[in-house]
Amino acid sequence: MTSPIDAPSSVRQDKYYLALPLGQRSPLRVIVDKRNLLVNLLLLGLLILLAGISLNTGSAASLSLPATLRALFGEGDPLDIFVIRDLRLPRVVAGIATGGAFALAGCLMQTVARNRLATPGIVGLDNGATAFAVASVVGTGISLAPPAMALTGAAVAAALTFGLTGRIGVRGYRFLVAGIGVGAVFGAITQLMLTRVSIDAANAAYPWTVGSLNARPDHAVLSLSLALLPALLAGIWLTRSLTVLRLSDAVAIGLGIAAGRCRMAALSVAVILPGLAVAVAGPVGMVALIGPEFARQLSARNTVPVLGATLAGAVVMVAADLLGRVLLAPIEIPVGIVTALIGSPLLLWILLNPNARTTP
Amino acid sequence: MTQEAFISTSADHDSAPDIATQGLSLAYGNVSVIEELELRLPGGQVTAIVGPNGCGKSTLLSGMSRLLKPRAGTVLLDGADIQRLPSRQLAKRLALLPQQPHAPEALTVAELVRFGRHPHQSWLRQWSPEDKRGVDEALELTGLTTLAERPVDALSGGQRQRAWIAMAIAQQTSTLLLDEPTSALDLGHQVEVYELIRSLTTTGKTIVMVIHDLIGACRYADHLIAMHQGRILAEGPPHETVTTDLVRRLYGVDCTLMTDPATGAPLLTNVRRTRDALDGSAT
């Protein structure tokens, strides 16, 4: 049950709903921004639509939409069921989970660093995760990188970046530059390792190192999916504090926010998620830039669109993967290349557009 | 201060909380700014902390508002160590307006003032009738009701500062700390902000402000604390505290001291650089 808020002077009725799940005297009183609610519903609709198209698109079998849906629910031709449920559905799920994870991590890190360029990919976490994952492939000879290795890599890269920056209190561009350096080092290490392995192993690893949903190991998708939901809830829980922390540390502390703890929590999520997502799809870091940006442009200003960014990231990932499969079919363009093609102009636009705010 | 005096001071201001420091040492990294400071600020009054640049007055305010963790000693708010209070509990009792805060683009006055309710809210209880009352009152007190939907960055300097003060008022604390609330403002806007701050004492608030403007401090504060190199040179009501000697030791300038015929506040005129570099305390 929702009701308009009776405070025209301070909370405008036309901008917010006051959700009172237990009636007028409800102890639960949650403000819902109308615009953000609409945006999130639209993004969710778009995501479902794209997932549907993605399930229905492919070279293995040409299915009608009703047949696709029937196969999704386990009815119809066994071959169709196999194609939809065992081949395409895991890929769509992996796309949603990785896109959501990268974008949620990006949104949190940008907000904490107060800089729209501060995404896990740009500060070197994706490359760190990739290097560790490749190291495990090179070292053990198995083609699937365990998520734990990628996670370790992301954590090591984060520790290095924060270590170089001095302390956890993130300092805008210094943090970025240190991160870019760390990322470059790990990128070089990855390339070096790939030149040392057999050409077959390098070939197998290549799509994954540019970012692809082709290689996705099932256990990695599972770990990521299990982490994403609590991470999203944590992000939503942190939104109230982050909205104030955006202003300044001094203002936030004055308002009773444990700034350090809040930042640590947000950054932990922003390190863990890309680590697990890289284990699935490789470094598709641009999604962390595109997703939150997309959500911010649509959402009400001065809100931290945690849920919106997650949904938008999933939308971008699924759409980019679909494009990569369709554009030059039957040749598949890795999703990382598609997102880079979309993301790079966006990055330039953020850097060069004088009207674009650099703070998220 | 003797034990008797100590007791009588606190008894005078039973309702309004006072702030005291005990053996307070504050430092940035290895650079010590304040050492072993003993201080007691009167409740229910406006206290102005003045002193030259780098004297430690903003550092002291940071220590009192828990932005800076003391190296040693304690800050007591009504006898309670602020380091031991949970953040939200402290924020319900003590509000802080940092130096020249920036509002994000397009943030409206009402949205900014709503942030002041943060310590009174939780995720499950994001808006209550008390919140509405607090915000409405703060807007009214600061004369911003009609500007509530305007973006903060579209306001004049004085209005913008009033909006930030409104946020601190909405916090409904008994103590308010302000770091240089008037330093970036022209004369008209300064007076606008000073008069607002003065008017808040009628609600029984204890107000502590760090300011550069000694004349404004004399005019609008009940209690003056003059700091120099991390120490307190003088404290008390402005007309008893400010002397030509103090002004010379604080700022290295000579002046003629008069009493403002209109307000009775000390007035500095004929301010000029001290010829002989006295005790070298002028920086």
Image (cartoon, coloured by chain):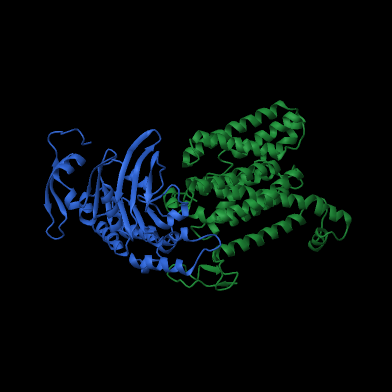
Chain colours: A green, B blue
Q: Classify B275 as above or below B12.
A: above
Quadrant housing residue A337: top right
Quick check: can you spot residue A323?
A: no
- Residue B240 in the image: x percent, y percent? 17, 50
Q: At x 51% / y 61%, what residue is drawn? A: A300
- Which residue is outermost to the front? B4
Classify residue A107 as left or right of residue B155: right
Quick check: can you spot residue A279?
A: yes
- Residue A332 in the image: x percent, y percent? 73, 45
Q: At x 45% / y 68%, what residue is drawn? A: B130
- Residue B235 in the image: x percent, y percent? 23, 47
Question: How many numbered tags mark residues here?
Answer: 0
Quadrant of the image containing the C terminus of chain B: top left
Classify residue A341 as left or right of residue B43: right
Quadrant housing residue A138: top right
Instruction: Judge by depth and name the residue closer to the eye, A282 or B101.
Output: B101
Classify residue B118 as left or right of residue B283: right
- Which residue is outermost to the top? A196
Q: At x 57% / y 47%, what residue is drawn? A: A106
- Residue B97 in the image: x percent, y percent? 37, 53
Instruction: Judge by depth and name the residue closer to the eye, B146 or B198.
Output: B198
Q: Classify A101 as above or below B172.
A: above
Instruction: Judge by depth and name the residue closer to the eye, A302 or A250.
Output: A250
Q: At x 12% / y 35%, what residue is drawn? A: B275
